[in-house]
Image (cartoon, grey):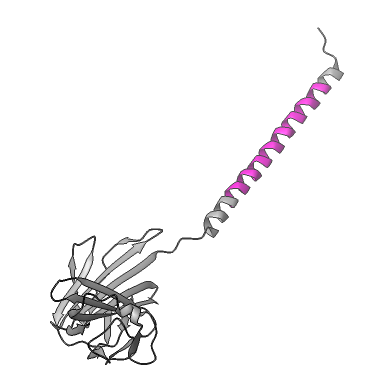
């Protein structure tokens, strides 16, 4: 059977078109695939990296009756939720290395007998070997008392002390204990003072009852926060005064 030349030419043109279409699709698929890879690469390069969060929490307590000071520090790092960790090279307090205690994670502790100094310093070295300090400062309480004694809940009174007025972040806690009944009364004062004095209204003093002899001691405390070498540091400093006896009528 003889094949028509026109039919052969038609088939050849169809085959050529199919080949050209496959070549087009192949070239475009390569372009699309390359574009996807490029977009992924750019996305991974420009995606922000979450910085590592670092925290330092400290606590210092001074007991004037015993002349003892106790300090604690905990360090945490990680993101998004920091976890307890050891500070590379350790932490020192007032120039002396702190010891690690396995209490609720990793806790650095130090305890000693000494006189009180207004500045309390924690320090450590960063990765570059530079000394980093976190400082807390607070004045002490030397002597204190009410202008009028016995103290009465029927009239206002002024409380004074030696050691400087209350500053930002500071508070006074008055701890009363009846020497006969052992009842206790707690008063907290949060205010800045120009002088080293607090004016008590009669209604506040009336909370100290019944009448009799009461032991009174004060806690002066201060919260300090700052960022040092990229670490969010915070600390609480407490000064427990010597006790005194107050007559209440």
Residue at the image position 20 percent from the left and 78 percent from the top:
211
Q: Is residue 162 above or below residue 17?
A: below
Based on the displayed image, in which of its 4 quarters is residue 72 positioned? bottom left
Q: Position of residue 165 (x, y in %)?
A: 34, 89
Split into 4 quadrants, where in the image is the C terminus?
bottom left
Residue at the image position 33 percent from the left and 90 percent from the top:
197
Q: Is residue 123 magenta?
A: no
Q: Is residue 244 in sight in this rendering?
A: yes
Q: Nearer the viewer, residue 165 or 73?
A: 165
Split into 4 quadrants, where in the image is the N terminus?
top right
Q: Position of residue 59 (x, y in %)?
A: 26, 74
Q: Nearer the viewer, residue 215 or 28?
A: 215
Q: Is residue 117 above or below residue 75?
A: below
Q: Nearer the viewer, residue 29 or 161?
A: 161
Counting the numbered discs, the total is 0
Q: Is residue 30 magenta?
A: yes
Residue at the image position 65 percent from the left and 40 percent from the top:
29
Residue 134 lies left or right of residue 149; in this view the side is: right
Residue 31 lies left or right of residue 95; in this view the side is: right
Q: Nearer the viewer, residue 13 or 108?
A: 108
Based on the displayed image, in which of its 4 quarters is residue 56 positioned? bottom left
Q: Is residue 117 above or below residue 22?
A: below
Residue 41 lies left or right of residue 116; in this view the side is: right
Q: Is residue 105 above or below residue 12?
A: below
Q: Position of residue 50 (x, y in %)?
A: 46, 61
Q: Magenta residues? A: 10-38
Q: Is residue 228 in sight in this rendering?
A: no
């Amino acid at each position: 059977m003889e094949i028509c030349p026109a039919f052969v030419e038609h088939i050849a043109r169809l085959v050529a078109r199919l080949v050209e279409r496959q070549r087009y699709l192949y070239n475009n698929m390569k372009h699309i695939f390359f574009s996807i890879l490029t977009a992924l690469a750019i996305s991974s390069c420009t995606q922000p990296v979450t910085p590592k969060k670092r925290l330092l929490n400290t606590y210092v307590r001074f007991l004037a009756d015993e002349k003892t000071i106790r300090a604690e520090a905990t360090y945490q790092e990680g993101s998004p939720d920091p976890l307890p960790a050891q500070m590379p090279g350790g932490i020192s307090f007032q120039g002396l290395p702190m010891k690690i205690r396995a209490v609720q994670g990793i806790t650095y502790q130090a305890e000693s007998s000494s006189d009180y100094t207004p500045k309390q310093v924690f320090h450590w070295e960063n990765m570059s070997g530079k000394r980093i300090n976190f400082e807390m400062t607070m004045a002490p309480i030397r002597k204190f008392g009410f202008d009028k004694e016995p103290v009465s809940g029927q009239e206002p009174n002024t409380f004074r002390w030696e050691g400087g007025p209350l500053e930002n972040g500071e508070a006074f806690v008055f701890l009363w204990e009846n020497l006969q009944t052992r009842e206790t009364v707690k008063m907290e004062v949060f205010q800045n003072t120009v002088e080293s004095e607090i004016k008590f209204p009669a209604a506040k003093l009336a909370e100290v009852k019944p009448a009799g002899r009461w032991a009174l001691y004060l806690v002066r405390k201060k919260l300090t926060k700052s960022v040092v070498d990229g670490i969010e540091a915070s600390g609480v400093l407490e000064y427990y005064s010597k006790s005194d006896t107050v007559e209440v009528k």
